[in-house]
Image (spheres, grey):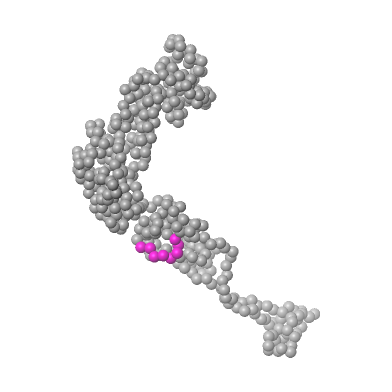
Amino acid sequence: MKKHTLLLPILLFLLPVLTLADTSLDYCNRQLEQEIKTTYGVESLNQYQTHLRDVLRYSRPALQDYGESEDGSISIPLPMVRDILSAEKDNRTTRELVDNLRHKYRPSPEDSLRTEDFDALAPRILDSATAAEWEKCKATCSACLANASGRQNGIAYRVHGDTKDVFGITFTYLPDREDDPRGIEVTRLTVTGGAVLHMLPNTSTEIGPGKSMVRYNAYTQHFRRTDPKQDAFIRVNLKGRENVLIRISQRRPEAGLPVGTVLSSVLPWKEYAEAANDNLPFNAWLNYWAPCDGRTIEGYRLRARIGKTQAPDLRGVFLRGRNRFDDEFGVQRDPKGLRPAGYDFQNHKVGKHDHRYYAAEATNTTKATFMGDEEKELQRDLWYGKDYKYQSKWGKTHDDPEGETRPKNIPMNYYIKIN
């Protein structure tokens, strides 16, 4: 592939104005636009993409003839055509990609080149240095912006490990004004609330008085919690611009399933906590989940909603559906009507009952009267005769049976969302 001599800047140090509405792709495409305008004489990136779409309308022999004759028969910049032909010749995969795109767009000649197809094709036909910087720019800026926890006054920051005793904040200076300098100076760093500045072994202060933050470089400063029940506030004073104030809550934000959700799992607690990326050892201020074993929990979000100070104890019990949200009872309602709210416990109970039995039809109506030891000499079997007169006497089995009545079951572990 023919190479062009380009005055290619290092993109990471020539990022222009970025606003909150900008994306990394917008920025990197603008940088690419500057390169292709110089190289191919096009007016914009959109025009370059239109020319690429036109390339797919022509066969390879037609483009080769145009490249050799230079007769202007095709309205595509000649350097573009030559670079594409050279890329196809040098790389079989590139040639197959172009052929596949020709086949893809042939049924719809009016369709524009799709973004995903441009992103796949452009790095293979552009000057190698331009393509490499474009890909590097997209990867670097995407990571910086996509992973940011927030952004204030030109500073993107990402909080990591905030559920641990020691957590860090990574700061990146992203210019947002045309006259912003290459770097900015930190004049003061203040930590208040439930944390203090923390120095890891063999490290120095990354963010502090006199330190400079060069744009698009990452600086990570660590902090240590002193009181997990208090929010921490980190203020960074910057020379020539407004300060940055970051609040680190003592609680992780509620995420995923809402508090009060109960899940069953085959995993024991430690394995479940690891699988859920939860905190170990258990800490009610930090954990999302708690075992349903009746443990006392203070300060968790669920308490604010239901007023309970303990997790439900579901060991060895069955769950029953309450779900009464209106004035109508369900079809399968409790015999007494009301179902207790929350997770109140009901003990096991077998309703008091007995089983009666009668003799069949008999002529001797007193036959079933004498049972047991009352009249040992009398016959105790029950019988009926021809007159079919029903028995009026009855006996009963042992009532109020002891022991447990239960259906078939298997054990599971229950966990409740508390934060």
Q: Quadrant of the N terminus?
A: top left
| Position of residue 41 in the picture relative to residue 327 (left or right) | left
**Residue 54, image x, y percentages:** 46, 20
Residue located at (45% from left, 67% from top): 344
Q: Can residue 98 be seen in this view?
A: no
Image position of 401 (left or right of 58)? right
Instruction: Give residue 284's position: percent from left, percent from top.
Output: 37, 59
Q: Which quadrant does the C terminus fall into?
A: bottom left
Q: Which residue is pictured at 30% across the width and 46% down the height?
A: 169
Which quarter of the picture shows residue 5?
A: top left
Front position in the image: 246 or 305: 246
Residue 146 on image: x %, y %: 37, 40
Image height check: is 406 above or below 281?
Answer: below
Q: Position of residue 224 (x, y in %)?
A: 29, 53
For this view, does 360 lie left or right of residue 9? Answer: right
Residue at figure coordinates x 74%, y 81% from the top left = 382
**Residue 321 in magenta?**
no
Q: Nearer the viewer, residue 299 or 80?
A: 80
State the extent of the magenta-drawn residues as a range: 291-298
Q: What predominant SS class does the magenta segment belong to? A: loop
Q: In this view, does 45 lie above or below 271?
A: above
Among the 4 quarters of the image, the one containing residue 13:
top left
Whether residue 219 is visible, yes or no, is yes
